[in-house]
Image: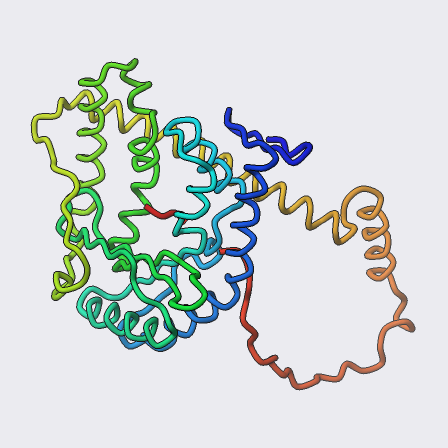
Amino acid sequence: MSTQAGAWTGGGYTLTPEQNRVITERWERAAAARGGMDAMMKGIQQETRAQGGKLEGLEYSLKDVDSFRRKAATALKNKRTPVAKTAKSINDLNRYTLTFESDTYTQGVEQTYGRLREAGYEPTAEKNTWEDPVYKGINTTWQHTESGERFELQFHTPESFDAKMENHELYELSRGNDLMKLAHENKPLAASYQDAANSLQSERYKNVKVPPGQERIGERLVRDKLNPGVPKEHVELVRQEETKLRAENLAKAQAKAEAKAQVERAALGLDGPGIGETQGLGNKLATKSPAEEPRQKTDVPRIDPVPTQSQSRGPVVR
């Protein structure tokens, strides 16, 4: 990817310097709001412990800026959506996931609703897909009544969250043009591949318990229907594509983690000549004569510091 002269390119998509400026400024506003939102959500997690309240993936609570750029550039190229419109309408630059135990799920969600309203937020979208065979959960969008800050909040049980994460690659295949490419632009064949992807995703929700009382929250939607007649060979082909994409995503994640580790090592002076110097120092310390050893080791009582709020990076939202 490139950001030369203010422009951006990545994955075959491009933003002009002006378009990139619009996207970057919108992302920077979300980044500035992140600390306060993270703290608020941590507070809700603490307050809903009795219902099993747990924040998942807090390190991804801010969408990656290049991912946002790619989304805007894709919408511009494929749907001719103006970049300014994408920047204005996006709701998931800040995003969170709360899980509650199935039997206390509805109580936990309703308690979270009350807490967010106390903080000045109101829901602008509430999609309840617990009756959908392909994706189960409640996805909401919230907006602050004064500042206009927006964020996405998903509600899951631990089991539905695990199924969602396991289905991530199938979701990627379904939302893009991958299945159409796999079908060589044959629309009926691509539709059958989509049925196969739906079947595989639904399979992983089979043993997920639907929380009692969830039907009273949000707009109940059934967006997908299963095709019991989908050919088995299509299911197997899509399964193979899922496996391939999962391996690719894992390799990318490992490469990203290694690149981050290299940057951190460089910042600590552990790369290059510094390593040898550090090892030399270690050898000297290891061979100190008895006279150089401390005469007495005094145990000092350990005092734990007061915990501070983390503002680490925090995604995959459906």
Q: Measured from the top left, where is residue 305 in percent x and y?
A: 61, 79
Q: Is residue 238 above or below residue 97?
A: above
Q: Measured from the top left, where is residue 225 in percent x and y?
A: 12, 37
14 relative position to 271: left or right: left
Q: Measured from the top left, where is residue 264 in percent x and y?
A: 68, 50
The quarter of the displayed image where residue 257 is located:
top right
Locate the C terminus and report the quarter of the image it occupies.
Answer: top left
Locate the N terminus and report the quarter of the image it occupies.
Answer: top right
Q: Which residue is pictured at 30% across the width and 26% down the height?
A: 240
Q: Which residue is pictured at 48% across the width and 42% down the height?
A: 68
Q: Measured from the top left, where is residue 296 in percent x and y?
A: 81, 82
Viewer-proximal residue among 83 and 251: 83
Q: Is residue 182 above or below residue 53?
A: above
Q: Is residue 261 above or below residue 50?
A: above
Q: Which residue is pictured at 55% across the width and 76% down the height?
A: 307
Q: Is residue 100 above or below residue 64?
A: below
102 relative position to 299: left or right: left
Q: How many marks?
A: 0
Q: How is the image coloured?
A: rainbow
119 relative position to 15: left or right: left
Q: Which residue is pictured at 40% across the width and 51% down the height?
A: 92
